[in-house]
Image: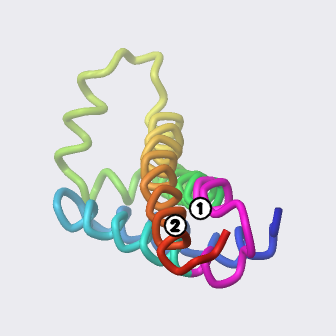
Amino acid sequence: MNWKVIMYLSPLGVAVGFAGIYGLSGDPRVVMWLGTSLICGVVVIRHAGRDYFVHSLLACILIGLLAGLTRAAMIDTYLLHNIQMEDVYGSMPKTVQPRLVAIMMGLYFGAVAGALSGSLSVAVGKLMGKK
């Protein structure tokens, strides 16, 4: 396991988090996550050496966690710039904390992006003749 590659990709999580805080939502957010998945896949293929799927999955989960933590730390600003999310949080039971939901959503999107990135990494790695 090459943890340097995973840590090298982790600042993308803070960038994704700040993009979400300042209003990037909907389709542009999906495109941003796809771009993040592609970046992870390319970096992993070039530098991980092996176990592309696991490296990509862990890197994207870490990116999602950092994005969620960034949003959770600045939840008031996030809700100010993402008015539609205020309605979502308002419809939840009062016992559910918006900060926890932000972290959990970051982990969820990170895991989905990681599975996509890992699958693409394995496929491209095989096409390139790498094991």
Q: Residue at x 25, y 40 (%)?
A: 86
Secondary structure type for disc 1: helix
Between the residue at mark 2 and the residue at mark 1, the CA separation in whole angstroms equals 7 Å
- Residue 35 pos. (x, y %): 36, 73
Disc 2 versus disc 1: nearer the observer: 2
- Residue 82 pos. (x, y %): 24, 55
Q: Do callouts 2 and 1 mark residues in contact (Cβ within 8 Å)? A: yes
How many C-alpha atoms fall within 10 Å of the one at disc 2: few (<14), some, or many (≥20)?
many
Name the foreground residue: 115 vs 107. 115
Q: Residue at x 44, y 55 (%)?
A: 113
Which residue was labeled with disc 2? 121
In the rendered image, residue 71 lying in the magenta stretch gets the answer no
Q: Residue at x 24, y 22 (%)?
A: 91
Which residue was labeled with disc 1? 56
Secondary structure type for disc 2: helix
Protein image colouring: rainbow
How many C-alpha atoms fall within 10 Å of the one at disc 1: few (<14), some, or many (≥20)?
many
Q: Which residues are magenta?
A: 43-57
